[in-house]
Image (tube, helix red, strand yellow):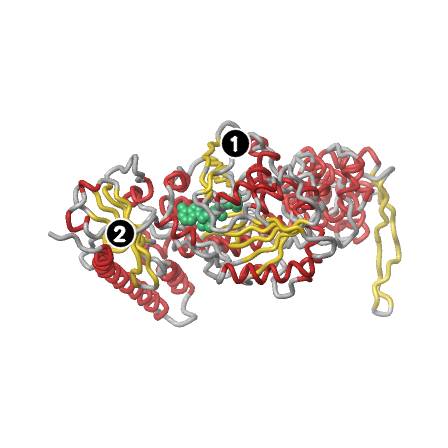
Amino acid sequence: MTPRKPSSARAEALRIEQHYVSMVYDRLDAARERAASALRAEHGRGGPGGTHQARLERDVSSAEHARRVAQLAGVERGLCFGRVDDGDGETYYIGRTGLRDAGNELVLIDWRAPAARPFYTATPSDPGPLVRRRHLHTRGRTVVDLDDEVFDLARISEPDRRTLVGEAALMAALRRGRTGRMGDVVATIQAEQDQVIRSGLGGALVVQGGPGTGKTVAALHRAAYLLYAHRDTLARRGVLVIGPNAVFLRYIGQVLPSLGETDVVLTTVGEMYPGVRATAADPPETAVVKGDPRMTDVVAAAVRGRQRVPDGDLEVLIDLRTSIRGGVEVVVERMALGVDHAACVRARDRARAVRGPHNVARKLFADTMLTALARDEARRLDLPPLDAEDLRYARAALWAQPSVRRALDELWPPLTPERLIADLLTDPALLYPAAASGPLREEEIQALLRPPGAPWTPGDVPLLDEAAELLGEDDAAGRAAARDAVRARREAELYAGEVLTITGVAETTLVEVDELADRNAYDGEALTTADRAARDRRWSYGHVIVDEAQELSAMAWRMVMRRIPARSLTVVGDIAQTGSAAGARSWGEMLDPYVKGRWREARLLVNYRTPAQIMAVATDVLRSVAPAEEPPISVRDGAAPPRALRVPGAGLPSVLPPLVEAELTAIGDGRLAVLTPDARHREIAVLLPGAASTLSPDALDSPAVVLTVTQAKGLEFDSVIVVAPEQILTQSPKGPQDLYVALTRPTQRLTVLHETPLPPHPLSPEHFTD
Ligand SMILES: Nc1ncnc2c1ncn2[C@@H]1O[C@H](COP(=O)(O)OP(=O)(O)OP(=O)(O)O)[C@@H](O)[C@H]1O
C-alpha cells in the first residue's frame, strides 16, 4: 500500500476524530437536556409558596439538578481533549467530564478518573500500557488539530500509523498569547504536576517550585481532583483557596468552573474575617510586627487589660426610690453601694480562672459583683440575710440600674474584636501595657500605633481573628441566639430526615440530613457549601489550598489553621519569591508549629512560562538571594532576547509611552505589564493614561496595566517592562526577591528601563541587547 501524504494523513485523522467528538457533544447535549428538564420539572412542582415541606423537598433536588446543569455548562469548551491507545488495541477518550452513550457505555472518561491517569503519566521512558497519546485541539465543536506522541510504533496498527500527526501539544499551549485570565491545562498536565494533583487528601503537602513551574495551575487542578475523588468528604465541608489579592483571584477565577467545579471558596487573607474589608496596606516594618507570633501574647494581654478592677473600692450610686411628679419619674432617694477592692480582685480572678472567652466570662464577673452589691444593699437597709431567691431578684434589680451597669461595663466591658483591635492600635495607654507581654520593643510599638479611624489592613485580619477567639460570643443575647439555633437545627434535622425518607433521596445518599438542615438554616434560603462557609468565621473546611503561601505571616498561619482542624492542606509557593517582610524564610518555620514532621514536599522544576533567555537574567538575581536554590529550567527558548534600555535623567515621559505602543504591536492580542518600584507607581501610571493602573479586579482585562511588583505576584504577561530595576532592588530588604518576581513575569518579551547604570550584580549586561 502506498503511504499517504502527511496532509491527507492529517485530514483523515481529523475526520475520524471529528466524528467521535461530534458524537460526544451530542451526548453532552442529551445530558444537559436531561438535567435541565429535571430542574424544570422540580420547579413545576408547586408555585413559589407551598407548604414548608414542599419547599424543602424542592430545595433538595433543585440544588442537585442546578449543580449538574452548572457543571455541564462549564465543560463546553474543549470537552474532549485527549485519546489514548493501549497495547491491546483499546482506545479511550479523555475529557472534562465523564459521559455515557444511550447504551450506558462510557464514551468519555473524566480526566480525574483513575482510568485517565496514563494519559498524564506516560513518558517515553515509562509509557505504562500506552502505545500512543493523542491531544485533540478543538475550536468550538470542531477538531482543528491533533498532536501524537508515539511510545511504541511497532504496536500501533497500520491504519493508525498512517494517521500519526502533530507537534508537542504542550508547546502549542505555551505559545498561545495571554488573555488576562489563567486557563486550565487539563489537556497538557505534565507527569510531575500530575503527582501533585493526585497526591492523597490527608496531611499537609507543600508544593515548592520556582516561578512559572505551574504551582498555581497544579493546585487548582488538585482542588478539582480532590472534589472528584473525595466528594463525600469534601462536598459538605468545602474547599478553600487562599490567594494573595483580588486581582489574582480574578485571574484564576475561571479555572475551576472550566473544570466543572463551582463549589470552591476563593479568598485572600484580608477577606477572611467576615464583615471586615482590608482596604489599606501596612508599611513593611508594621507588617513584620503584626505578623509576628508574639502578637498572640499582645492580643491576649490586651484582652486581660480590659478586665479591670478599681484602684480602690468600687462605689456606685443607685436610685432607691422614685416617684411620678407631673407625669415624670423623679428620683427622690439615692443610696451608695460598695464592693471593697479585695472583693473586686477576687471577682475578676474567679472569672478569669474559668478560662472562658472574655464575653462569656463577663457574665460570671458581673454575677459575682452584683451579688456583692446586693449583699451590701441588704446590709445598709438592715434587711435579713438574703436567700437564693432574694439574691436572684436583687441582682436583676441592680442590673437594671444604669449606674450599676455602667460601672460594671467599665470594669469588664462587652467587646467586639473590631473594638478591641482598633482601640489597641490607636491608644498608647492600652498598647504599651499589652506590648510588655510580647515583649515588643519601643520601635515595634511605634510601628503599630496609628490614628483613630484608620482603615483595616490585611495584617489586622489575623489579629481580629485572634481577638474573636479570645472574646467569644457577645454576652447572653449571643448565647440565647446560639441556643435557639441549636433548637431550630434539631427540628430542621428531624424534619429533613422525614423529607429524605419521603422523597426516597435517603437511599441514594445524595444529600445528608445535616447538609439539608444546613441548607435551610438561613431563613429557608438554599445556600451552597461555599456560600455558607464564606459567611462563617468558624467554618472548618475539608481542605485548604494556600497559594503564594510564602507571603503569609506566622499570625496569618494561625488564622488559616483554625479553619482546618483536620490539617488537610496544600501549601503552594516559592521561598525565593517571598516579598512580604513578615513572610516565610522556610516552610518548616511556618508549618512545624502545626504539623511538625507531618508535612511532605513536592518540587516542581520546569518553568513553563519564561523563555530561557529571560530566565538567564532572573537566575543571576536568584543566585544573589538564594544561592542554594536551583533555578527552574525553561521548557522553551524565546524569540526575542531581553532588552535593557538606559533612560537618561528625566527621559521616562518621552521613552515609556512609545515603548509601550511598540510592545503592544509586537504582542498583538496579548497582555503587557509595566512593573514599577512601589514609590513610583503613581508617577508612572500618569504617563500611561490608556493603561489600567488601579487594583480593581478587572484591571487585567486591559491590554496594558501598570503594577507594583507585589501586585503582579502570581500573574504573567506576554510583554513586561520593568522600570528602574535598580530602585526595585533597594526599595526594601526584600528588594532582590521583588526584582526576581518582576523578571519572571514575561511569557515572551522583557524590557528593562534603567535610569542609572545597571547594577552588574545581579543584572549582568551580557544577557541583554539594547
Ligand atoms: N502542564 C501545563 N500545560 C500548559 N501550560 C502550563 C502547564 N503547566 C503550567 N503551565 C502554564 O505556565 C504558566 C505558569 O503557571 P503558574 O502560574 O501556575 O506557575 P507558578 O509556579 O504558580 O508561578 P509563580 O510562582 O510565578 O506564580 C501558566 O500560564 C500556566 O498555564
Residue under the point 30% across and 51% down: 166
Q: Nearer the viewer, residue 457 or 284?
A: 284
The residue furthest bottom is: 47
Mark 1 or mark 2, earlier in chain: 2
- Dot 2: what SS? loop
Q: Image height check: is 558 above or below 247?
A: above
- What amino acid type is highlighted by mark number 1? Val
The answer to whether the beta carbon of the residue marked 1 is less than 8 Å from any atom of ligand 1 is no
- On screen, residue 751 versus residue 1, left or right, reads right
> Would you call the spot at circle 1 few (<14 residues within 10 Å), some (14-19), or many (20 or more)?
some
- Dot 1: what SS? helix
Residue 480 in sight from this viewpoint: no
- What amino acid type is highlighted by mark number 2? Val
Residue 351 position within the rendered picture, expressed as x and y whole percent measured from the top left: 70, 37
Residue under the point 75% across and 36% down: 347
* Among the 4 quarters of the image, the one containing residue 150: top left
Residue under the point 19% across and 51% down: 162
- Residue where numbered disc 2 is placed: 165
Residue 161 in sight from this viewpoint: yes
- Residue where numbered disc 1 is placed: 595
Residue 269 position within the rendered picture, expressed as x and y whole percent measured from the top left: 59, 47
Residue 335 position within the rendered picture, expressed as x and y whole percent measured from the top left: 87, 49
Q: Nearer the viewer, residue 181 or 317?
A: 181
The answer to whether the beta carbon of the residue marked 2 is less than 8 Å from any atom of ligand 1 is no
Q: Image height check: is 686 above or below 124?
A: below
Q: Nearer the viewer, mark 1 or mark 2?
A: 2
